[in-house]
Amino acid sequence: MTIKKKGQIGPRYFVYFVGLLIMALGIVLLIKADLGATPWDVLHVGFYYQVGLTIGSWSIICGFVILTIAAILSKEFPQLGAFLNMILVGLFIDFYLLIPILQTPDHLFGKLVMFVFGLLLMGYGMGFYLSAQLGAGPRDSLMIAVTSKTGWKVRNVRAGMEVIVLFIGWQLGGPVFWGTILFSLTIGPIVGAALPQCQDFTDEWLKKLGKSKQVILEESKRGASL
């Protein structure tokens, strides 16, 4: 994914950064809810259980491997946004996991509330970071590379990727439960609803920011001419 709308790179990176922060919080809430993590986080947690390190570290390591495979398949060097996504999400996950108040609730109702909030935050976080239009993350980069190489449909490629990593993560002891299935069924519609809203918000904010900058420049020119 390339930058579709040029200019205002600084503000776009701010939106990108905030989107990744929100998405990472959603990921951690889903893990802490203990009702089943996302397929990729089942893999990350499984590696954490078997090898050690941190969940965020495995997110970064897996992201690096995925980007390498995507680069080989596409014969293109990954976008800067893909590297930022890989590193920042891993760091944010570990940061949130260190917050004492983010603990698994004792009762099912509390777990459900945490799960739902995590699902919504992850969906809208993805919507915000994608609205900045600064490049896809590692997993989306691999999906695009495989689709371009094989001609297979995007939904089939993505579904295949999710099933493979879910199976490997499950074999490693990752947290698979009914929430994993619920996530797989609902995250698409949530992102589908969130992305247009986030894109409209980002575009409107960038538009207002551009107008404010233009006003400041015009006033500066007037002042210089006096």
Image: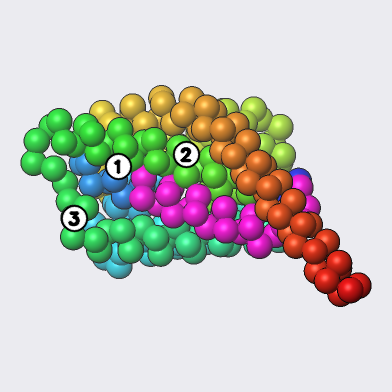
Instruction: Specify few, some or many for label 1: CA neighbours under 10 Å numbering under 14, 14-19, or 20 or more.
Output: many
SS of the residue under disc 1: helix
- Amino acid type, residue under disc 3 in the picture: Ile
> How far apart are the two marked residues, 2 and 1, measured between alpha carbons?
14 Å
> How far apart are the two marked residues, 3 and 1, measured between alpha carbons?
15 Å
Q: Earlier in the sequence, mark 3 or mark 1?
A: 1
Q: What residue is shown at x 21% (from left), y 53% (from top)? A: 102
25 in magenta:
yes
Observer-nearest of 71 and 188: 188
Instruction: Specify few, some or many for label 2: CA neighbours under 10 Å numbering under 14, 14-19, or 20 or more.
Output: many
User: x%, y% of residue 162?
Assistant: 45, 37
Q: Residue 124 carries which label?
A: 2
SS of the residue under disc 2: helix
> How far apart are the two marked residues, 2 and 3, measured between alpha carbons?
22 Å
* Part of the protein shown in magenta: 5-26
Q: In this view, does 163 lie to the left or right of 203?
A: left
Q: What residue is shown at x 52% (from left), y 27% (from top)? A: 193
Q: Which quarter shows the C terminus?
A: bottom right
- Which of the two discs, 2 and 1, sits closer to the camera? 2
SS of the residue under disc 3: loop
Task: Name the outermost residue toward the left.
Answer: 106
Q: What residue is shown at x 48% (from left), y 62% (from top)? A: 88
Residue ID for mark 3:
101
Q: Indicate the quadrant where residue 148 lies.
A: top right
Residue ID for mark 1:
30
Marks counted in the figure total: 3
Asked whether the residues under the numbered discs 3 and 1 touch, taking CB atoms below 8 Å apart as contact, a structural biologist would say no
Q: Magenta stretch mostly in which secondary structure?
A: helix
From this viewpoint, is residue 146 visible? no
Up-down: is 115 above or below 23? Answer: above
- Amino acid type, residue under disc 1 in the picture: Leu
From this viewpoint, is residue 196 visible? yes
